[in-house]
Image (cartoon, rainbow, N blue to C red):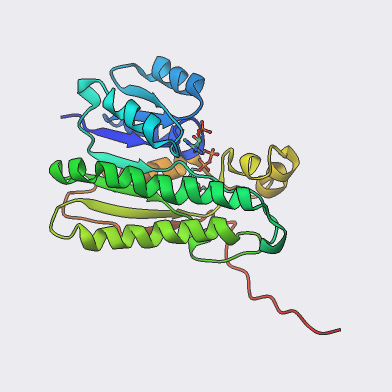
Amino acid sequence: MSRTALITGATAGIGEACVRNMVAHGWRCIATGRRAERLTALVAELGADKVHAACFDVTDEAARDAALADLPASFAGIDLLVNNAGLALGTAPAQGSDLDQWKTMIDTNVTALVSLTHKLLPALIERNGAVINLSSVAANYPYPGGNVYGGTKAFVRQFTLGLRSDLHGTGVRVTSIEPGMVETEFTMVRTGGNAEAHQKLYGGADPMTADDIAETVRWVAQLPPHLNINTLELMPVSQSYAGFQIARES
Ligand code: NAP
C-alpha cells in the first residue's frame, strides 16, 4: 500500500528532491511551499495522483490549517512528516546583524516546525508514522556568522531527541538529519540573491546535492519499523572541521 509523506519546503532544493525521490519509490507526497507555480509544475510533472500541492507559508498557521483541511481523501492519512522548510538569513556577526532576520529564522525554522509537528502528532501516532527533521551541521559546530541559524538548527536536533523520548512506546520514529554543504538555493536566499557568494562557496568544492539528502531521507523513511536512526550527520568529502580562533592583544 502506498504511503503518504508531507514534505515542507518542496519548491526547491532538498524538499523538491525529496518529493521526486519518494514518488519514484511509490510514495504519495503532499508538497508544500509558498511558490505556487513551482508546486503546480511538480504536480504536472509527477501526476496529481502522486503529488498534492499545498501552498502556504509555514509561519501562517491559519493558511496551513486551511490547506490541510482541504486535502483530498487519498492524501489525508499522513504517514511521514518531513520538516524541511527552513532558511538562513545573513552572514554578519551577531553584533552587526539584522534582528528581523533573526526573528524570521526562528519563526520559520523553530516555531513553524514545532507547530506543524504538534498538529500532526496525533495522526502520526495513530498511523505508526515517522518524523524526519532537517537540522544541520550548524547545530553541532559553531562558525562565525552562524549565530541564530545555528541556534535554530540546534533546537531542531534537540527537539528531535526529545520527541524520541516522549514518543517512546508509540512506534513513531523520529530522526534528525544534519547535512553539511548542499548546493541548493540556500546561499542565494541567505545572501539576498548574491550569485557570486553562491559560486564562491560551492565552486570547485564538489558539494553534496539535494538528491544526496533526498536519498538519505527516503532510506531513513523506508527502514524496517523496528529501526530508528536518531541523528545522521553528512558532509561532502571536501568539507571537514576547522580549529578554534584566538584573538591576541596588539
Ligand atoms: P532552499 O533550496 O532554499 O529551499 C528551502 C525551501 O524552504 C523552499 O522550498 C522554500 O519554499 C521553503 N521555505 C522557506 N521559508 C518558508 C516559509 N516561510 N514557508 C514555506 N516554505 C518556506 O534550501 P535547502 O538547502 O533545500 O534547505 C532545506 C532545509 O535544509 C532547510 O531547513 C535548511 O536549513 C536545511 N539545510 C540546508 C543545507 C544546505 O547546505 N543547503 C545544509 C544543512 C541543512 P518557498 O520559498 O517557495 O516558500
Q: Residue at x 27, y 30 (%)?
A: 27
Residue 250 found in image quarter: bottom right
Instruction: Tell me where residue 137 appears, x and y as whole percent.
Output: 50, 59
Instruction: Tell me where residue 78 appears, x and y as whole percent.
Output: 23, 35
Q: Residue at x 30, y 62 (%)?
A: 162
Q: Residue at x 19, y 44 (%)?
A: 122
The answer, for residue 28, to whether it is visible in the render is: yes
Q: Is residue 197 above or below residue 76?
A: below
Q: Foreground: 79 or 110? A: 110
Q: Residue at x 20, y 21 (%)?
A: 73
Residue 71 found in image quarter: top left
Q: Quarter holding the N terminus?
A: top left
Q: Residue furthest front?
A: 62
Q: Is residue 25 above or below residue 72?
A: below
Residue 69 found in image quarter: top left
Total marks placed = 0
**Lateral position of residue 156 relative to residue 247, left or right:** left
**Lateral position of residue 29 relative to residue 12, left or right:** left
Instruction: Tell me where residue 178 appears, x and y as whole percent.
Output: 44, 55
Q: Residue furthest bottom?
A: 249
Instruction: Tell me where residue 24 appears, x and y as whole percent.
Output: 33, 28
The answer, for residue 23, to whether it is visible in the render is: no
